[in-house]
Image: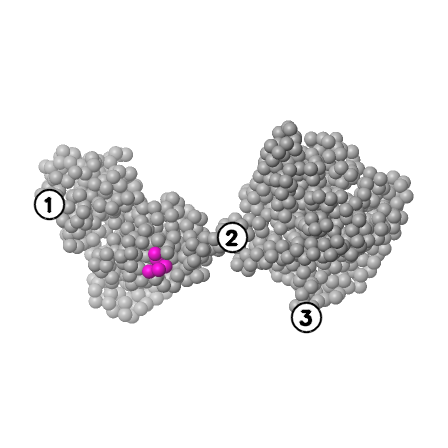
Amino acid sequence: MHIKVIANALGVVAAALGAAMLVPGIFAAFTGEGNAPIFLVPAFASIVGGGVLFYFTRRNENTYVSIRDVFLIVSLGWIGVAAIGSIPFAVSGTLSPVNAFFDSMAGFTTTGASTILVPEDTAASILLWRSMSQWAGGIGIIVLFVSIAPIVGFGATQLYSAEMPNPTQERITPRIQDTAKVLTYIYLSLTVGISAALLLAGMGLFDAVNHAFTTVATGGYSTRSDSIAAFDSAPIEAVIIVGMILSGTNFTLYFFAAQGRLRRAATSPELLAYLGIIATGALLMTGSLYFFDYNDSLLRSFREALFQSASLSSGTAFSTADWNAWDSFSQAILMVLMAIGGCAGSTSGGIKVVRIVLLAKSAAQDAFRMIHPRAVTPLTMNGRVVPERLRVAFLGFFFVYGATLAVGTLLIALHQVPLGSAFGAVFACVNITGTSLGPVGDPDFYAALPASAKFILAFFMLLGRLELFTVLVLLTPAFWRT
Amino acid sequence: MRTVIIGAGEVGFTTARMLSGEGHQVVLIEQDEALVQSATEQLDALVIHGNGASPKSLSEAGIEKADLLVASSNSDEVNIIACLSSKAQGVERTVARIHNPDYYDPEEPLARDLLGIDFVIHTEEMAARAIKDALMVPGAINIDNFANDSIEVAEVALDEDSPIVGQALKDVKLPEQSLIVGVVRDGEALVPGGGTVLREKDHVLLISGRRRLAEVVRAAATDTAPVKDVVIYGGGRIGLRLALALEKAKMSVKVIERSEDRARVVASQLKRGFVLHADTLTEDFLRQERVDHADAFVAVTGDDRANLLAAMYAGRLGARRTIAGLSRGEFAPLSEALGVDVTISPRMLAAEAILRFVRKGEIVNVALLEGGAEMIELRVPEKCPLNGRPLSEVSFPKGAIIGALLRGEEVIIPTGRDSLQPGDDAVIFTVESAVDEVEELFAS
């Protein structure tokens, strides 16, 4: 553990967050809604505090960053950012301090759960900040999982580590900064692209920017209570569907595409599986919605099914229909899509398609070895052998995923929340959708929870966002032993 | 012609014997003293004890006067260095045996040019190809291609159930445009006449145009059901290449490999086939994996003894055809007694390829057969004394027979009424004693 290194990194994060907070501050000053100080004061405090921290701990050439430092920086960073980010919600009086922290964590983890009851009654600057928190969390996740995690060795993206431009171990090098820069450009382009497309599709400027922020982050905060259904526009839905699918794609592939390796990007087995899952989910739900008489129009069924399929696969959880009223089969598919999630190295949540693909392959191989006990079955992905260590890690992940849901459900049920909702809430947080079936997902549900349950759920959002082990490793004695 | 050969191992030795038999002045360079000794005793060649890569040994061998260098040592690097330095000394043609695919890519001639090698011998590649050819024509134990693959020759071992056993050659019914061109009986090659009666255990050579061979073989062999399931024992260089080639030919492939690490390497390259890791071949294991029901069992580990025994074992259990790779000549005579259907000798394949290359110009192609016989493909020259007259009227060397002609695009299986024309490619079966006579006849 190197306190100096950790403090230094957290200083940078705090300063960056402060800079981001200037945006709603300036917006509030321009629109004259009077909220400017509640953004600008903490923004400047954060910038100055972070800057000072950074300055006094700045490193020389030889500073060594250990794996433990990275884990601590990441977890502390997200918690700290959520705490600072909650200040405007609390100070403006929009939310109580506990609810403010819950919402802020839901924002920066791109979960999208909220305790803001009626967005339409909330100040525009607060809504902008809410959307920005998801957007900032999204870029944080992309940089973390695409440029840092494969090198340090955590998360599903380590599968791609051999393909990333930097094989150096354990060191934050200038190469990582280059990668991060390219990823930021890609992320910005997507944001600008989606905003422009939404404007063209007929959305107002403020709504377009907010929805672009939360689409690219697959977060799902909307400026309307009824989410995308409020606009009731096919072009807007189409833009959002494409945006969600693009944002749930592995950003490594955009990296390849930017390098001109388009073929390599377009034939990624994870991408093909991801698109296949969305398409299959959409088709099954179209049929189910039509035949079980939720909708009497096949076209309408398809339109709703495709939107919901893309929305929950990518973990965005925008909605254009009230899926609580859907038939059981369609609801079950939604749950499965939420659990699978999007691609590794994207802003989406869930188990991740690449893990599902490899777990399924591995299970098929296990069955094969029952018949051929001596068969040697290396796990391959895109023609390359996946190290056995990673196969074991993925199996371990799946166990921990199940265990996390179980423990979480127990903890929430302890607060005497009905069991279905307790499970649903944990499921929504761990898969970073923020929404689940039944009442879960409604702001009044979260708002009504006891404070301790809110903190527990906030913790599970962090767990899900950072792919479980990254946070859980901090809870092991081995981590703290020197 | 002076030829320098590096390495007196199986390939070098065989090549030296063949070339000195054809009148080349052969100089062998070998590092191992025991091999130097045995080569000196058995060959009509100068054998030098030394390192083939060293310029000193090469100049001692008179490399500056040589026209041909055959680098057939076991080390790729030695072979490459020898080729490079001989090229620098003005040797016209170089042949090298290369194992490591890093140095050899058939699609990338640049590496070859840079390394100064005119002709690369890749024994593993050749062995894999030969085995695949034999599997693609069920019933045949060996296939050779001539005239740019438009003429094919199959070797079929006759067993007691074969439909043509006991028949005189003139009574044998074969599909049109095909011919029994030669017979190997008890290890001795002979040109059959109309009255020759075919016996059990004879190896007959059938010739025909491309794509008709399987049909022709069916008329002579007993077991000609197509091969679908193949078990390969040994996932080494030959085994892996073979497995990939068979996968491409839509066969189902199982590879049994003794080393776990190697098994993983092979497994990661196969698409539909799979790899089994087993240190020992127990009956239980072989039955579990249905080797007893396999269409073919191919043993190509690096160990000749293991190959023979495994092939025999699989044959006893019920595998339809068994093939063993034998890198040394030692045990080859045993294969028939052990009930192994086919043996593939990378050493012979390499020697064959070298001979083919060396004779280029006079001879288009050659295949070495049992009992010293050869199938050779020759271009008919302008001034051949046989030109224009019906074959029944010309005197052709005893112990040789024309099996097929390629005239333009057309394949002709000649009868007594056909005649040779300049520019034809003639595929000729000849016993050892008639080789020189045949070549003289076709010399331009």
Residue at mark 3 shares a chain with residue at mark 2: yes
Amino acid at pointer 3: Arg
Residue at the image point whose x is 45% and y is 55% from the top: A369
Label 2 residue SS: helix
Q: Which residue is mark 2?
A: A363
Label 1 – label 3 distance at C-alpha: 90 Å
Amino acid at pointer 1: Thr
Residue A135 image label: none
Q: From which residue to which does the magenta span run?
A: B283-287
Chain under numbered label 1 = B
Instruction: List x then y, in percent, for residue A193.
Output: 70, 38
Indicate whether A7 appears above or below B297: below
Q: Which residue is mark 1?
A: B196
Classify the position of the N terminus of chain B by image quarter.
bottom left
Instruction: List x then y, in percent, for residue B97.
Output: 35, 56
User: Is B137 within the magenta?
Assistant: no
Amino acid at pointer 2: Ala
Residue A481 image label: 3
Q: Nearer the viewer, residue B353 or A248?
A: A248
